[in-house]
Amino acid sequence: MTVRPGLPLRVEVIPGEALLERLLTHLPAPVTVSVTCLPHHGPQEAVQTAVVLADAGYTAIPHLAARSVTDRRALAGYVHQCMDAGITEVFVIGGDLPEAAGPYAWSGALMQDIADLSGGGLRMGIAVYPEGHPAADDEELVATLRSRQDLASWCVTQLCFDPETLRAFPGRLRADGIELPVWAGIPGPVRVSRLLRLTRRIGVGQSLGFLRRSASSSNSGSVMRQLVTTASYDPAPLVRAVDGAGYAGLHVYSFNDLAELAGSELAAPMTGGR
């Protein structure tokens, strides 16, 4: 890592064993931590993890996956757990279950019920897709964003490895009438073996297409060579790309590789430069 970001940062983590202890060791509070909701974990584990992190002094943002929420009563429980713990924001996604576990097939209805159940006390973030989405064309994505931006407070880009695409994306959103603050989703300095293994598992594997394309490009081939020949991915080109591009901050996908992240310049603003 060769650049120090000038934007606010937050870190996305995956619920797992000894997560709090590892965070306290490598990224002590206060840090803003976003907690994923994977299909095999479900929203309950994301919320419980977020509550534990909030109690430890972190600003925690649990993810709520619509297709994993069994009913409105369960959702009310998650909302009340968050609010009782002082959590003020959640990140709402559709989720990756092939069939919805309850009445929420997509995130829109879930957002409406969260707003109702929380009395507006929970701010909501939503996902945006610089490289598109396999289940919807660009026109559908824009229409969906427009319909949900009144309920949302911010948005986060799906993981993207392409600096040019990431830099241009806020301008594309504004041209489409989307005025939400947007956070740039980038990988941290993650061990390459872990990055390749987990990206598809947590639903961000689509951007690996850029890496495959870069292998045959003389201008971008260095990205693929880096993945093949070095121990950790260097997000410096992405950090440089988003500088001055209109982003509200950097949303760092850590894949729980917290030691690598803590040892990088990327984490310096969060750790006091240690």
Image (spheres, helix red, strand yellow):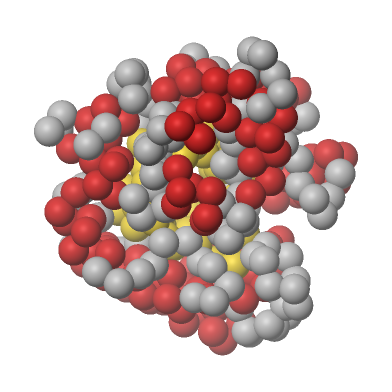
Q: Position of residue 210 (x, y in %)?
A: 67, 33
> Is 154 above or below relative to 222?
below
Q: Position of residue 168 (x, y in %)?
A: 65, 20
The residue depicted at 59 percent of the width and 67 percent of the height is: 65
> Is 142 above or below relative to 199?
above
> Is 100 above or below relative to 64?
below
Q: Nearer the viewer, residue 121 or 206?
A: 206
Which quadrant is home to the C terminus? top left
Q: Is residue 96 visible?
A: yes
Q: Nearer the viewer, residue 156 or 114?
A: 156
Q: Nearer the viewer, residue 224 or 165?
A: 224
The residue depicted at 27 percent of the width and 27 percent of the height is: 265
In this rendering, the count of numbered labels is: 0
Residue 256, quarter of the rendered image: bottom left
Q: Specify whether 126 is left or right of 18.
A: right
Residue extending farthest to the front is 229
The residue depicted at 50 percent of the width and 25 percent of the height is: 238
Q: Is residue 88 visible?
A: no
Q: Specify whether 82 is left or right of 210.
A: left
Which quadrant is home to the N terminus? top left
Q: Position of residue 102 (x, y in %)?
A: 70, 83
Q: Position of residue 33 (x, y in %)?
A: 34, 52
The residue depicted at 70 percent of the width and 19 percent of the height is: 217
Residue 163, quarter of the rendered image: top right
Q: Specify whether 148 is left or right of 18.
A: right
